[in-house]
Image (spheres, rainbow, N blue to C red):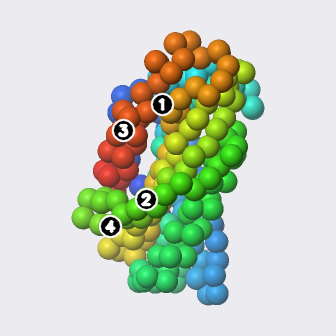
Amino acid sequence: MTDEDPPAPRVDVPDGWVATETTTERVFSVSKVTVTATTVVYEDERLREGGDDGGEAETKSFRRFVFASRLRLRPTTKPSKPLTKLVRSRAKAGFADRLRERGMDGVEERESRRFRVRDQDATLVGYDAECTVEGTRLAVDGWVAVWPRDDGDYVVAGGAYPTRVLDGGGVEGGNETLEPGRYRDDLFSIIREIN
């Protein structure tokens, strides 16, 4: 990380969540503008569908997760509607890719709406996806929000959580053990407090 790289966003997560990854990378360049992001990912260690994988490369468990990225543009560029639209478009594509990398398929954008984050308006985009864990098919909701900061940086934040068992019997308790309403509220609360 250099002095030019953005710091990781501050993310206040509940007990039981652990940071699993922090990265800094150039995410894209357009014309003479370079965008670098520092991203931190947290997972809910308490919610594991199908048990732990013991550290193997290919996970057999689903953990709800939340991430936050702070994007810095160089040279410094003041946020504008066209720039925000570009960042949002790239963030949506990157989030869909992140869901696929985490073993989800059938990833489809479902909705887009305004979302209040502190004193900023963000764009919040919802996704439907599915994943298979230990022979059990789960429906998953994913959300990603994008907003400009007053200092010219952008924040991209989101996460995903299981909503229901689609088929299979591998999840003990089935749908009764899943709390999608609470998971969504937790995710939105975390996103609203990111700084």
| Residue 44, disc | 1
- 3 and 4 marks in contact (CB < 8 Å): no
Q: Secondary structure at mark 4?
A: strand
Indicate which label's residue lies in the foreground, 2 or 3: 2
Indicate which label's residue lies in the foreground, 1 or 3: 3
In the depicted view, which residue is nearer to us: 31 or 107?
Answer: 107
Q: Quadrant of the C terminus?
A: bottom left
Q: CA distance from mark 1 to mark 3?
A: 11 Å
Residue 83 placement, left or right of 167: left
Mark 4 lies on residue = 121
Q: CA distance from mark 2 to mark 4?
A: 9 Å
- Say which label, 2 or 1, has the lower sequence index: 1
In the depicted view, which residue is nearer to us: 117 or 127?
Answer: 127
- 2 and 4 marks in contact (CB < 8 Å): no
Residue 27 placement, left or right of 14: right
- 1 and 4 marks in contact (CB < 8 Å): no
- Say which label, 3 or 4, has the lower sequence index: 4
At label 1, which amino acid type do we have?
Answer: Asp
Q: Quadrant of the N terminus?
A: bottom right
At label 3, which amino acid type do we have?
Answer: Asp
- For disc 1, the neighbor class at 10 Å (few under 14, some 14 to 19, many from 20) is many
Q: Secondary structure at mark 2?
A: strand
Residue at the spot 50% in from the left edge and 33% down from the top edge: 163
Quadrant housing residue 93: bottom right
At label 4, which amino acid type do we have?
Answer: Asp
Mark 3 lies on residue = 186
- Say which label, 1 or 4, has the lower sequence index: 1
Q: Position of residue 54 (x, y in %)?
A: 68, 20
| Residue 124, disc | 2
Q: Secondary structure at mark 1?
A: strand
